[in-house]
Amino acid sequence: MSPRLRCLTSVLFLAGLASSRYAVCDPVTNQPPLQTLLARNYTASINLANYLVSEKLDGVRALWDGQHLRFRSGNIIHAPSWFTSRLPSHPMDGELWTGRQQFDQVSAAVRRLVPANDEWQTISYQVFELPDGYGSFEDRLRQLNLSADRVGVPWLQVVHQFSVEDEQELHLTLRRFVKLGGEGLMLHRRDAVWQTGRSDALLKLKDYLDAEAKVIAYEAGKGKYQGKMGALLLEMPNGKKFKLGTGFSDALRLAPPELGSMVTYRYRDLTPQGIPRFASFLRLHETD
């Protein structure tokens, strides 16, 4: 199906006249947003020999459609022409990344309508998937490495994938990366064909859990937070509500997330009532 026909099908779908897995096309390129694979949480019951492991990068997910970098929403990322002009003509999936614990910096940089060259000089495109590629994940990984070698620019890098022997080595590796400031690990099934949606083909492992919830109310601050936001009242996707009062900067307490917006929080586990235990604000949920 041609891109133009896929776009038309999307419009029909939105009108209730057809079904399609494609979202609305970008008005500049007339291309539908690329579909992505989303991770599930790691469980200890899997056979680790079937998986390759990599560091979980705390960057901004970016999809290259052969002409433009895009957010997951399909919106174009306004990168400098020197950054994109040397990228391959085939699609890629990866993260725009500046380093560990620098999410806020890279997020601000890639959302500018007019890119700042000095900021993009610090950004690399760390790719880990070849959308619509043939063969297993290992096959697609080899193709990505060949492509990156041909391009030969330092800002295009293939995420390093490695094996672990057992559960003990996996958790030792997790602790090593966390100690260095990393976010966690990703496990990608070696023999997985390219697919989209949430799947056991991709797993994430962190030293904490995280989730998203909707902001439905504010609680006024007291004491040192007098005149500022003290806590957010959040609603989980299952309808349960809880207060989130830690992890906020002073700037966020003065200008808290909008009502109805989504935030990402981290937590240790759930209480018997299903409420996050030791929850702390992590970031505004990425809608792009």
Image (cartoon, rainbow, N blue to C red):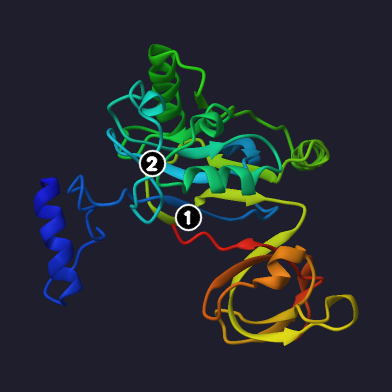
Task: Answer above or below: position of 142 versus 221.
Answer: above
Q: Quadrant of residue 59?
A: top right
Discs 1, 2 touching: Cβ within 8 Å: no
The residue sitting at the right extreme is 223
> Label 1 is placed on what type of residue?
Ser
Residue with the mark numbered 1: 199
Is 63 left or right of 259, judged from the image as shown?
left
Q: Nearer the viewer, residue 270 or 212?
A: 212
Q: Residues within 10 Å of mark 1 (few under 14, many from 20)?
A: few
| Label 1 vs label 2, nearer the camera | 2
Q: Position of residue 145 (x, y in %)?
A: 45, 20
> Label 2 is placed on what type of residue?
His
Q: Position of residue 256 (x, y in %)?
A: 65, 73
Task: Answer above or below: position of 215 versus 175.
Answer: below
Q: Which mark is residue 78?
A: 2
Is 244 left or right of 34, judged from the image as shown?
right
Q: Secondary structure at mark 2?
A: loop
Q: Quadrant of residue 257?
A: bottom right
Identify the residue at image location x=46%, y=62%.
287
Picture quarter with the C terminus? bottom left
Q: Position of residue 115 (x, y in %)?
A: 44, 38
Earlier along the polypeptide chain: callout 1 or callout 2? Answer: 2
**Is residue 47 visible in this depiction of the protein?**
no
